């Protein structure tokens, strides 16, 4: 089967999972007892999971771990954090070199107890002495936080090859219970574990979806969210479509419903996406990105990358013409330059409390002050007209108020996350630079106000601040919460 495209094209691996208004992928279909999704301990504040998939654990290189930082009234608090890995006494398995625990994450209330759970895909994990690979670990939320875990045990797909490569949680059949969609490299690629999932790791059922037979899409990424507002979560399947000797990017929307996920139309291809209501009409809009340059291979690309908005409606995909935004679009800061990778990572959230979902787009290939691939982040504003360049802001490590300095190959913006961790109804911006300090990685926290994201008061931290080991780890490569 065709290799997963994003890894094949750019070896620096995965981007952040997204969150936003009307978004279920990377969020939970059922909120914690506090009423807030992404709240692992039910105290009323959203928490953040930070992956370090190349972190050394028990002397095993690239075994990987996840750092969890809990939210408070003052935002994320590094003193309230924990490290989770296969060396944790409550996590199944043992650390092994190359497992990359944490390089795929999502969240959702899988057992229906009201607490948000953390789901970790360990797609490189070898199953005993077999040729099968891939496990999915659920770390259960509770009043004490994330303190117990289990591997999905039954039912399981007949073939397991890179199980957990993609993850997305949502109520795909509309029965009020959270289901878990997983992506692998077998046929069928897409498997949906029906909720609830018990604390013993048993799902209520399993359904395989052959995306290749149904749509011709070689799936590489899945993103969940509500497009038509009918109460069932929809799923965007992103990947490649064979066209002669070429494999251009293509995406297809699968609508959720009582009979499960059904294909409902193709949309612009890309490598990352979020589903969020950027025009506040009550329907989720598909915001997808193609960080490649426009070519016959990737016609949805653009100078330095492009972001495309496909609007939602009661019928699903709207008849409105999709809107394409690049760094050359009016009012978008900076300039479109080849190799910028505009949109490598995406996240959605309301940054100023006006009810419109805004979009953070990572630009990790942006050169800053002559520093190659130093990286930047652009925040695009939602409005009654939809997503536009009006009011857009850009941030780099050279922006006044941002800690540190832009350095070559840091790839600031390789991961982004918009989340309200202090419950003020405005999403803050979290930025990852996995290549910072020769691959140790780092995380930046930006505050927000009535005018949206600001660099004033921004802070940053590395793995050591939350108890992680020193050295190569790619700390901050993936976020969830």
Image: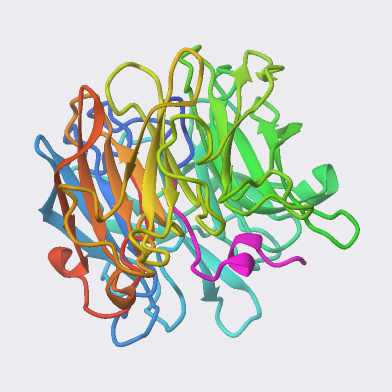
Quarter location, residue 263: top right
When the figure is inspected, residue 164 is found, relative to residue 168, above or below; the finding is below
Look at the image and tell me whether residue 63 can be seen: yes
**Rendered residue at 59%/85% (across/down):** 129
Q: Nearer the viewer, residue 292 or 12?
A: 292
Q: Residue at x 41, y 57 (%)?
A: 414
- Asked if one can make out residue 20 in the rendered structure from this viewpoint, the answer is no
The quadrant holding residue 187 is bottom right
Residue nearest the observer in this picture, 93 or 359: 359
Membership of 28 in magenta stretch: no
Q: Which residues are magenta?
A: 1-18
Q: Residue at x 62, y 54 (%)?
A: 292
Quarter-wise, where is residue 200 in the image?
A: bottom left
Q: Position of residue 264 (x, y in %)?
A: 74, 29
Q: Point out the image quarter for the C terminus.
A: top left
- Work out which quarter of the rendered image holds the N terminus and state it: bottom right
Residue 15: within the magenta? yes
Above-or-below relation of 318 to 167: above
Q: Is residue 426 above or below residue 130?
A: above
């Amino acid at each position: 089967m065709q290799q997963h495209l994003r890894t094949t094209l750019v070896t620096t691996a995965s981007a952040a999972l997204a969150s936003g208004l009307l978004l279920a992928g990377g969020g939970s279909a059922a909120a914690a007892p506090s009423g807030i999704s992404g709240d692992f301990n039910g105290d009323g504040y959203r928490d953040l999971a930070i992956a370090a998939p190349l972190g050394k654990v028990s002397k095993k290189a690239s075994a990987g771990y996840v750092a969890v930082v809990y939210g408070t009234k003052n935002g994320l608090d590094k003193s309230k954090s924990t490290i989770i890995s296969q060396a944790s006494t409550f996590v199944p398995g043992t650390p092994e070199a190359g497992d990359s625990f944490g390089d795929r994450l999502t969240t959702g209330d899988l057992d229906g107890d009201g607490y948000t759970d953390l789901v970790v895909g360990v797609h490189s994990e070898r199953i005993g002495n077999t040729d099968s690979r891939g496990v999915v670990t659920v770390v259960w939320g509770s009043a004490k936080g994330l303190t117990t875990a289990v591997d999905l045990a039954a039912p399981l797909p007949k073939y397991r090859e890179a199980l957990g490569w993609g993850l997305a949680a949502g109520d795909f059949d509309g029965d009020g219970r959270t289901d878990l969609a997983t992506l692998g490299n077998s046929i069928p690629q897409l498997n949906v574990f029906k909720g609830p999932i018990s604390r013993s790791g048993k799902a209520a059922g399993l359904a395989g979806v052959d995306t290749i037979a149904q749509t011709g899409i070689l799936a590489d990424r899945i993103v969940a969210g509500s497009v038509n507002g009918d109460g069932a979560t929809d799923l965007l399947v992103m990947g490649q479509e064979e066209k002669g000797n070429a494999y251009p990017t293509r995406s297809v929307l699968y609508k959720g419903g009582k009979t499960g996920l059904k294909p409902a139309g193709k949309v612009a291809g890309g490598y990352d996406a979020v589903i969020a209501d950027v025009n506040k009409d009550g329907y989720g809009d598909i915001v997808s990105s193609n960080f490649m340059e426009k070519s016959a291979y990737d016609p949805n690309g653009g100078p330095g990358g492009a972001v495309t908005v496909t609007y939602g409606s009661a019928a699903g995909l709207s008849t409105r013409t999709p809107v394409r935004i690049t760094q050359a679009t009016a009012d978008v800061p900076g300039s479109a330059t080849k190799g910028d990778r505009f949109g490598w990572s995406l996240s959605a959230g309301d940054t100023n409390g006006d009810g419109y979902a805004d979009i953070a787009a990572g630009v990790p290939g942006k050169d800053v002050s002559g520093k190659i691939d130093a990286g930047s982040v652009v925040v695009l504003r939602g409005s009654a007209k939809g997503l536009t360049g009006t009011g857009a802001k850009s941030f780099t490590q050279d922006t006044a108020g941002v800690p540190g300095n832009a350095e070559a190959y840091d790839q600031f913006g390789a991961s982004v996350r918009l989340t309200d961790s202090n419950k003020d109804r405005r999403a803050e911006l979290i930025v990852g630079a996995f290549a910072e300090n020769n691959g140790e990685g780092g995380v930046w926290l930006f505050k927000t106000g009535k005018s949206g994201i600001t660099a004033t008061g921004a802070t940053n931290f590395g793995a050591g601040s939350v108890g992680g080991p020193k050295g190569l780890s790619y700390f901050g490569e993936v976020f969830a919460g």
